[in-house]
Amino acid sequence: MLKFPNLLIALAVVASPSFADTYGLGRVALPEEIAAWNKDVRPDGTGLPVGSGDVLAGEEIFSEKCGACHGDFAEGVGNWPKLAGGTDTLDRDDPLKTVGSYWPYLSTTWDYVNRSMPFGDAQSLSPDEVYSIVAYIIYSNDLVDEDFVLSNETFADFELPNKDGFIIDDRLDTEHIKWVGEPCMENCKADVKVTMRALVLDVTPEEDAAKAVASEPAAVEETVVVEEVEPVLAALDEELVAKGAKVFKKCKACHKVGDKAKNGTGPMLNGIFDAPAGQVEKFKYSKALKTAAEGGLVWDDASLRAFLKKPKAFMKGTKMSFSGLKKDKDFDAIIEFLKSNSQ
C-alpha cells in the first residue's frame, strides 16, 4: 500500500514532457501583476501616473516622510545622501553630487521616490505625494520658485541643469582592446614611485610656515586692566522665543544651540546675535563667508533677516543648503530665539 500516492502523482506530472522546460514551477504572470511591477518612468514622462503636487505641500510631506534621513531642507543628515546643493562643484576633485548638481533626468528622482521611498515603507506614497516631494527637492536646489507645481502634464517641460553632462559609454569599442590579453604577473614595471599625495591637502601645515612660526620671537605679554561693564540686556519676548524654538527645528539638522552645543554640518549658534560673522572656533567656513566676515559682516537683525530669507542670494557661494524661511512671522520668532541664546 502506497503511503504518499499524491506525491507520486505530482512527480509523474512534473516528469512529463509538457513540464520539461519549467520544471513544473510557476505560471504565466497575470496582466495586473505585471502592471504592479511596471513602475518605471522615462525621461520624457512616459510611465507617469496622473497627478500633481506643489512645493509647499511637498515641504510638509518631505519633513514628515524624508527629513529624518535627508534633513528638512534636503541637506542630508549624517551619512544619508544630500539631495540639494553642490552647484558648480562637478569640476572639483570632491564634487557634491545631488539631484540639482549631478542627476541628468528628473524621471530618475520621481521613479526612485515612487519605487523605494520612504525607507522602510516603500511604495506607500500616493502619486500626488510623490509629485509634491519631487517638486520640493528641485525647489531646495533653487531650480524653481515656491509656487511651482509639478504634474504629469508639465513633467517633460522641466530639465535638470546637468542634462547634457553624460555621454554614451563606448568603452567596449574604444578601450576594450587595452583590457584584453595576457596579464602581466611579474616584473611589470622597472620601478615604483609615489606620484600623488592624498586628495585632502590641507590637513598638514606647510613646513616653511611651521619653521617661520617657530623662529618668531616670543610675544611679550602686556597686562591690560579692563573695567568690566555689565551689559544692558533687552527683555526677551518669551512667547516669541518659544515659537522660535519650533522654527529652529528646521535648522537642527545642521546647527546646535545650548550648553552642550557643538559644531556639526554648520557652526553652533550660541552668541551669534550682534556678533561678527565667522567667529565660531574650529569651524571651517566657506570662502564666501570668510570674505563677508573680513568685510565686517555682523549678524544683527537686518543681516539675519536677509540671510534667512534666501541664503544663496544674500551670500553667493555659501555652503548653506537651506533655501530660506517663507513665512514672515517666522523671522521675528527665530531671531528672538537666537537672541535668547546670545545672552
Image: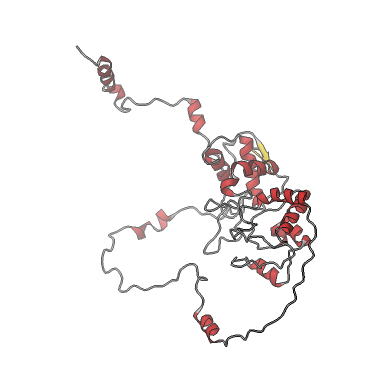
Q: Position of residue 203 (x, y in %)?
A: 51, 70
> Going 66% across and 44% down the picture, which residue do you hit?
59
Q: Position of residue 307 (x, y in %)?
A: 72, 59
Name the side, left or right, on which 92 lies relative to 140: left
Instruction: Give 267 or 44, whichever is nearer the viewer.
Output: 267
Residue furthest top in the image: 1
Q: Is residue 183 visible?
A: yes
Looking at the rendering, in which quadrant would you find the C terminus?
A: bottom right
Residue 180: quadrant of the picture: bottom left
Instruction: Give 314 or 35, whichever is nearer the viewer.
Output: 314
| Rendered image coloring scheme | secondary structure
Residue furthest left in the image: 1
Q: Can you say whether 190 is above or below 247 in the image?
A: below
Q: Position of residue 27 (x, y in %)?
A: 39, 25
Q: Is residue 309 visible?
A: no
Q: Position of residue 159 (x, y in %)?
A: 63, 49
Q: Can you say whether 99 is above or below 287 in the image?
A: above
> Going 74% across and 67% down the picture, which residue do you hit?
298
Name the side, left or right, on which 178 lies relative to 334: left
Q: How many marks?
A: 0
Residue 193: quadrant of the picture: bottom left
Looking at the rendering, in which quadrant would you find the N terminus?
A: top left
Name the side, left or right, on which 132 lies relative to 40: right
Q: Can you say whether 1 is above or below 320 in the image?
A: above
